[in-house]
Amino acid sequence: MFRIESKIDPASAEFLQNKTEFMKILEKYKETLGTIRQGGPAAAIKRHKERGKLLARERIDLLIDKNTPFIELSPLAAFDMYKNEFPSAGIVTGIGVIHGKETMIIANDATVKGGTYVKESIKKHVRAQEIAKENRLPCVYLVDSGGVFLPEQANVFPDKYDFGRFFFNQARLSAMGIPQIAVVMGSCTAGGAYVPAMSDETIIVRNQGTIFIGGPPLVKAATGEEVTAEELGGAEVHTSISGVADHLAENDIHAIQICRNIFESIHRHEHQELEIHEAVDPYYDPEELYGILPVDLKKAVDSREIIARIIDGSLFHEFKERYAPTLVTGFARIMGYPIGILANNGVLFSETSLKGAHFIQLCTSRKIPILFLQNITGFIVGKQYEHGGIARDGAKFVHAVANADVPKFTIIFGGSFGAGNYAMAGRAYEPRFLFMYPNAKISVMGGEQAANVLITVKEEQLKAAGKTMSEEEIDHLRNTILKKYEDEGSAYFSTARLWDDGIIDPVDTRKIIALSIAISQNKFYEKTNFGIFRM
Ligand code: COA
């Protein structure tokens, strides 16, 4: 492989200016993350601790093997929603290693409205189970939840991917031989009772964990029976009378130890072999990404400059370097793992689409995972291109991406607009993980384009009625749309709604992608079958 020759001068004024602006964006993100990670209000945290309970993230720290990383997913879920009363949507999810096995951990944060679920908490829980299924990861549920956040019931209760999906998923995952372990460290009420009840093995903490289909107030209202929570469904009851739980723990730490012990008898089923080399640092410093990444999306960035700061030794075997230059394709290694990379360098043309589809076929036939680096305004428009069959060639690319059955990973490092999002493995194309950089933007088209389209549509409507719009009306419409697209296109807006798996610091890309590939090895890479390519 050849080393990418960078054309960037890290001492140039342009680089330094970009870096200054990027650092502001990054600091805002880190500050926001720091605040969110504290969990619920101070009074709720204090009360939680006074009850002798550990916080959700403290529980996870103790559960995973010492000195191993935890990839936390979507920590900014529900950000800027519900008056910011649901930090992280009240649930911490992510992948950690327990006794050497990569495991999906789903932990309620009881300091956030009693660990109850709003729409985004549900999406996060279901997404975590989906990742567990795609990568065959055992699941540990650290349960401490009042169930559905009742005022939001219409958004969380009845639909296919709502609350009921948790238990459906547990049953299906268990049937696939993917272990399901619950640790009851607080409340498990109503539907929530099924999390431990549906698990393969369940631990419950004395004088702290409770499991019941209906709590004491409901029982009193329904039957008149007066009973305490502990008598109704505490740890003593469930480990010695009902048998709903299997292990009695004295406190959080003890429960976590029992959970770790369970993992001693859990074995890996299968493992996809990959040729792994010794990891080598990139030749170019990854921190230089801060001076290169597009803060202003109008600025063109050669994506090779990004690739050079992500891959081992900055060594890249570029495929079709001279053909269809708006899509860079090639093979490389990230921390020793093999990877095929597709990165945007402009709009997608017919030939770009063919090049992308061809490269994906190479990756699937060689069973090499694929990394998509998105910075895309979309497919080319215009009479010449429509006549040339851009839709037909674009369809080949989209076909290839949709059917590629090797693990796909997507990072949005700039803009993600229109059908370009789809072709480059956006969320709907099931990349195993999708992360955004804090400067990234995502929407159906750019704000200015959307404003122009809508102004044209309005003007045509009025023209048909013999009317026109004044300059002020046009300006007002334009500014309203620009503002809406600016707000809704931000990485924060996306991550709050679980359109991605989280915002990441660009310098962590290597570590996160390498871990993602390692996680993907828990399931054999399937043989890809492509559908009909329109020729
Ligand atoms: N829906 C909406 N809000 C809920 C809730 C629910 N199911 N359960 C708790 N809350 C809210 C409380 O109103 C309170 O809000 P506030 O901080 O704005 O006052 C906050 O969550 C914390 O609840 P609190 O009862 O003060 O905390 P706790 O730690 O002593 O008890 C629970 C937590 C979950 C054990 C207890 O609140 C409870 O039993 N809730 C009802 C559970 C239930 O019946 N769920 C059925 C859902 S299907």
Image (tube, rainbow, N blue to C red):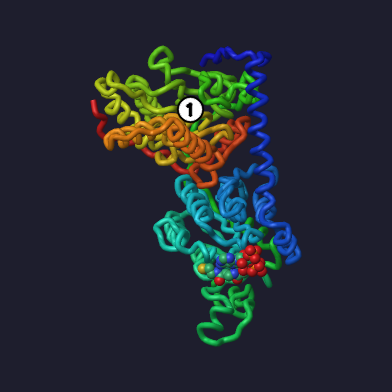
Residue at 54% of width from left, 15% of height from top?
4
Report the front residue among 72 and 518: 72
Q: Is residue 464 visible?
A: yes
Side of 108 where 389 appears, left or right:
left
Q: Position of residue 520 (x, y in %)?
A: 49, 40
Quarter of the rendered structure image containing ligand 1: bottom right
Give the camera-side residue of 455 and 251.
455
Residue 327 rendering spot, x and y as whole percentages = 43, 21
> Is residue 202 placed above or below 421 in the rendered structure?
below
Q: Position of residue 266 (x, y in %)?
A: 55, 54
Q: Which residue is mark 1?
A: 375
- Crowding at label 1, few (<14), some or many (≥20) Cα neighbours within 10 Å? many
Say if 72 sits above or below 107 in the image: above
| Spot occupied by residue 418 in the image (x, y as percentages of width and height) | 40, 33
Q: How many marks?
A: 1
Question: For this rendering, which residue is in front, 92 or 361?
Answer: 92
Residue depicted at x 63% and y 73%: 235
Three-letter amino acid code at the position of disc 1: Asn
Visible in this render: residue 247? Answer: no
Q: Secondary structure at mark 1?
A: strand
